[in-house]
Amino acid sequence: DPPGPPTDITAADEKPPTTSDAASVRMAVALAFPVVGAAVMAGGIFDGISPRFYAGVAGVLGVALGVGVSRLGRRPLLTYLAVVVGLFAIGALMVLPSGPGDVLRVHRLAADAASTGNVLRPPVEFEVGWRAIIGWLLGTVGFGSVWLAVVVRRPSLGLLAPMPIAALCGISVPSSAQVASGLAVLVLFAVGL
């Protein structure tokens, strides 16, 4: 037998039929800008600048998770597990700076924060539970954007996926911060294009 390409077809099944690794990383970088734009708006609902930072980091971690999971190939169980564990870990990482003990009670902290969300008007104090919620929300937005663009091969939808979150959060941003936040979001979405 002459040497040639391997005939083992399982090697070809290891990767999904998506774009090349370099192209998916370039796409992820472009997608990170609108995701950070949505993070700017989501963080604007809370007091101070740190919520925008937490939201931005969570969004970028979601984008990185999307790239990593897209490279797992056609292994559905591993893919689902990586998505669930990865998204939970993003929320837990956002809580970690307040203390490792808070990570163990993240469910209770998030539930307490969500219950106060119905009675408070923005800007809201950025309690520990909100960090987890923002982490999960923006991590999911970042992951979903990459998944749409790289795996589903709909880059336009991937770029637009963060827009509803930015729009919904923009309604709740205090009026004193709406213009500056809106311009930042506009610039970040434009850079992503």
Image (spheres, rainbow, N blue to C red):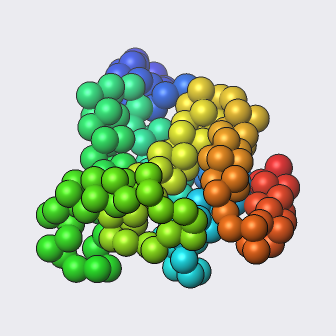
Residue 72 placement (x, y as % from top left):
39, 38
Which residue shows up at 16% across the image and 62% down it?
105
Residue 49 placement (x, y as % from top left):
58, 80
Q: Is residue 2 left or right of residue 149?
A: left
Compared with 13, 163 (above or below) is below
**Residue 3 occupies quadrant:** top left
Q: Nearer the viewer, residue 48 or 99?
A: 48
Q: Is residue 143 left or right of residue 156?
A: left
**Residue 172 occupies quadrant:** bottom right
Residue 125 placement (x, y as % from top left):
45, 74
Which residue shows up at 69% across the image and 29% down it?
154
Q: Nearer the viewer, residue 32 or 134?
A: 134
Which residue shows up at 36% across the image and 41% down it?
83
For the N terminus, give its image quadrant.
top left
Q: Is residue 136 left or right of residue 98?
A: right
Residue 129 placement (x, y as % from top left):
33, 64
The mark tally for this picture is: 0
Say whether residue 29 is visible: no
Compared with 137, 2 (above or below) is above
Which residue shows up at 34% across the image and 53% down it?
115
Say whether residue 185 is visible: yes
Q: Is residue 91 left or right of residue 140?
A: left
Q: Nearer the viewer, residue 105 or 123?
A: 123
